[in-house]
Image: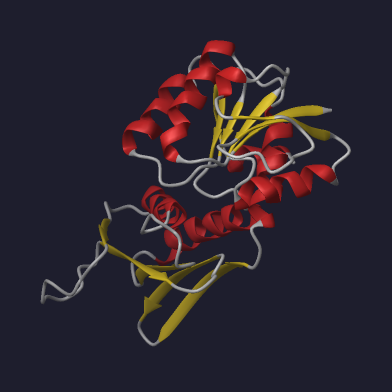
């Protein structure tokens, strides 16, 4: 049994995690962190430092303004943490990497197993197609999402960068410069509208042919499932930085 502290317990993703854990006989939420208490089946605190219950792993689906305190607590108490919050700053990501030398931390730009398989497929395709194909990424999300481009789109671009032999330039906006597309560009385009949960497309455009790899999430539950799997995966792990690639490999 994996005992979980859920940060952001009463947000949309926190409620999705709660639903997944309720149906899982190998995991249990023992406490939550949030600014409001919605009558949860477990106690909810405003600060992680107020929690009285014992737990094995932290799942963080809160807000970047809270992530630093969660990382500090995890490091001070040597408790594994699964960081699922999006929109983190470069400094916070560096902090995750630095703290992972002393505490087990799991961090992925996207908690969907499907999107991580997409990244693997895109990396393989990029190695084969880089000479003759231009690469563009399109991401679509709901109209309440704050960050653009999405962390997942950037993770896809980073995966491509690892795979190809040249140093790509990420281009987010072409309207201000009138020039031909450079071969080393990876175009990254964002769309916000309605209630789109998350769609990512990678387009390989060559001479007289186009290859497209897509992933579409129709429910936030896919991210909650990944987070719970990661929490169970992290129980008892030694210090280090873990991600979806390792989780999938050991599944």
User: In the displayed structure, would residue 31 be above or below residue 131?
Assistant: above
Q: In the displayed orientation, state which residue is furthest to the bottom.
A: 208
Q: Can you tell which quarter of the image residue 64 is in?
A: top left
Q: Residue at x 44, y 81 (%)?
A: 210
Q: Nearer the viewer, residue 155 or 67?
A: 67
Q: Is residue 239 visible?
A: no
Residue 190 is left or right of residue 107, and the answer is left
Residue 222 is left or right of residue 159, and the answer is right
User: In the displayed structure, would residue 159 be above or below residue 236?
Assistant: below
Q: State the image coordinates of residue 83 (x, y, percent, origin top left).
A: 54, 36
Q: Nearer the viewer, residue 35 or 111?
A: 35
Q: Nearer the viewer, residue 98 or 120?
A: 98
Q: State the image coordinates of residue 243 (x, y, percent, origin top left).
A: 57, 38
Q: Nearer the viewer, residue 89 or 195?
A: 195
Q: State the image coordinates of residue 27 (x, y, percent, origin top left).
A: 81, 34
Quadrant holding the N terminus: top right
């Amino acid at each position: 049994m994996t005992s979980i502290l859920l940060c952001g317990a009463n947000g949309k993703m926190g409620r999705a995690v709660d639903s997944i854990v309720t149906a899982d006989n190998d995991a249990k939420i023992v406490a939550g962190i949030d600014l409001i208490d919605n009558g949860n089946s477990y106690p909810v605190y405003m600060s992680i430092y107020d929690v009285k219950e014992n737990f094995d792993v932290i799942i963080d689906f809160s807000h970047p303004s809270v992530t630093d305190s969660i990382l500090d607590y995890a490091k001070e108490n040597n408790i594994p943490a699964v960081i699922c919050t999006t929109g983190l700053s470069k400094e916070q990501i560096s902090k995750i990497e630095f703290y992972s030398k002393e505490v087990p931390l799991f961090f992925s730009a996207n908690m969907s197993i499907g999107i991580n398989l997409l990244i693997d497929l895109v990396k393989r395709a990029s190695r084969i197609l880089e000479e003759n194909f231009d690469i563009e990424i399109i991401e679509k999300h709901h109209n309440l999402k704050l960050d653009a481009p999405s962390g997942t789109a950037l993770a896809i671009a980073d995966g491509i960068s690892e795979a190809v032999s040249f140093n790509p330039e990420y281009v987010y906006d072409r309207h201000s410069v009138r020039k031909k597309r450079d071969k080393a560009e990876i175009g990254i385009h964002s769309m916000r509208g309605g209630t789109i949960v998350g769609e990512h497309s990678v387009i390989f455009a060559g001479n007289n042919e186009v290859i497209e790899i897509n992933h579409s999430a129709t429910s936030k539950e896919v991210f909650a499932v990944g987070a719970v799997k990661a929490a169970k995966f992290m129980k008892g792990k030694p210090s280090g930085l873990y991600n979806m690639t390792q989780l999938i490999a050991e599944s």
